[in-house]
Structure formats: structure tokens, C-alpha cells
Amino acid sequence: MLNKRLLLLMLMALVAVLGSPLAQVAWADSDEGNHGREMTIAGFADVPGSTLQLPLAAGASPVVINVTFGIPNVTIAVQVTTATKVKSDFGLPVTLTDGDRIQVDMRVVVVGADSLLRADKIEVEAFPELELIGTAKGLPAAGVTLPLAAGTTVDFAIALGASGVDVPVRLTANTKINGHIVALHNGDTLRVEAAVRNNKIVVTEINRSPSGP
């Protein structure tokens, strides 16, 4: 936990980076009473042990994660509790990994003589780490109807252009579908955005490639 002086210095550091056009900080009005968010920050997660499953299990002890943002970088410690609401483009529960982009709604709470930042809500954002353009292969012969049913996944590959390189990807029920796609078939020309999760390349968004039919 932080004492009030350290917390004040940390908040001053936040204000200092607000002048940078690349600093991803947004101040928000509190909700009614003292239980609303006081600040929202978007940045990159650093979690104990490199991974953390969210939401926390009932009865679990609070966990402190670090959120890094801005240029120059600022890192702040945020407490996550069982009361922290979690939203994820990858579904729930979600494994938060070092380097994941998150948005955190938080507020200052006082515990004894110390103060800390406590997360009211964490959103794990599916910003693209990969963009692939190629043709679908490895799908069932009859194709796949979209969107997928909740909790289901489909593994297939994107064959990249003339190189013949196949990139294995995973489609989920949380994949955002663009371009009025209602089904996928082998040979379809696609553009996908994806992120690596649990050693799988998970498609976060899919569209027809402009060069496709």
C-alpha cells in the first residue's frame, strides 16, 4: 500500500504526462457517492507471475498489478479484488498476461494510514498484434457458419499469398465479424486481425480481403 505522500507524488506524475499527446489517460467524474470511478487509464499490464486469471475467484486475496502508459513511461500499481468487474473481448474467464493492453476504471481508497488505487473495472482490450491477408484452408468441407455459438472455437489456417506459408489461427464466438460474412469456406480470401493468447493466434476481427470475391 502507498502512504498519502507517495500517492500524491504518483498522481502528480500522472498529471505531468498529460501534456504528451500520446499519454493514454482520461479523467472521469465520480459516480454518485464515493463508490464511483475517479480515474480511467489505458496501458499495458504487468502481473505477478506473468499471468493472472480474471475475474478473481470468490474468496481470493486482492492482487496488485502494474499498469504502464504514456511517453515517457509512467507505471502505477493498482489493486484488483473479487469485486473488480472484468470485461474481455476474449470472453470470461480471461488470462491476463504481461503486455496485455487493458483499460482500468479506478478510485483512491484509504486503508488505515495508507492509500491505494483500487480497480472497479478492468477491460482486456483486443488490439491487433497481427494482421494477416490470405486464403482460408483447413476448414470443414461444408464451411463454418458465423458467428460461432457461445463457447465454441474453430481452428484453421490462413495461407499467405504466393509464399505458401500457412499461419494457424483460432476463430471464437467473440471474433468480430465485418463485411456481412455469414459463413467461411476453404479458399475464401480474408483479412484478419489477431492477438496471441495461450500460445494460440486468436482472431479478434475478420473481414473479406479487398482482393477477394
Image (cartoon, rainbow, N blue to C red):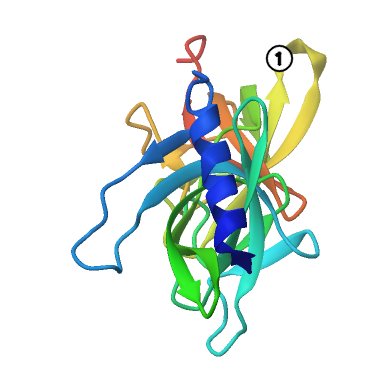
**Residue under the point 66% across and 29% down:** 130
Q: Residue furthest left?
A: 32
Confirm whether residue 85 shows in the render.
Answer: no
Looking at the image, residue 86 sits to the left or right of residue 63; the answer is left
The residue wearing badge 1 is: 161
Three-letter code for the amino acid on which mark 1 is drawn: Gly
Q: Residue furthest bottom?
A: 59
Q: Between residues 168 and 28, which one lies in front from this camera angle?
A: 28
Confirm whether residue 208 shows in the render.
Answer: yes
**Residue under the point 28% across and 68% down:** 34
User: Which corner quadrant of the image does residue 44 belong to?
Assistant: top right
Looking at the image, residue 99 sits to the left or right of residue 54; the answer is right
User: Which corner quadrant of the image does residue 128 belong to?
Assistant: top right
Which image quarter holds the C terminus?
top left
**Residue 142 percent location from the top left of the image:** 51, 45
Indicate whether 158 appears above or below 111: above
SS for dot 1: helix
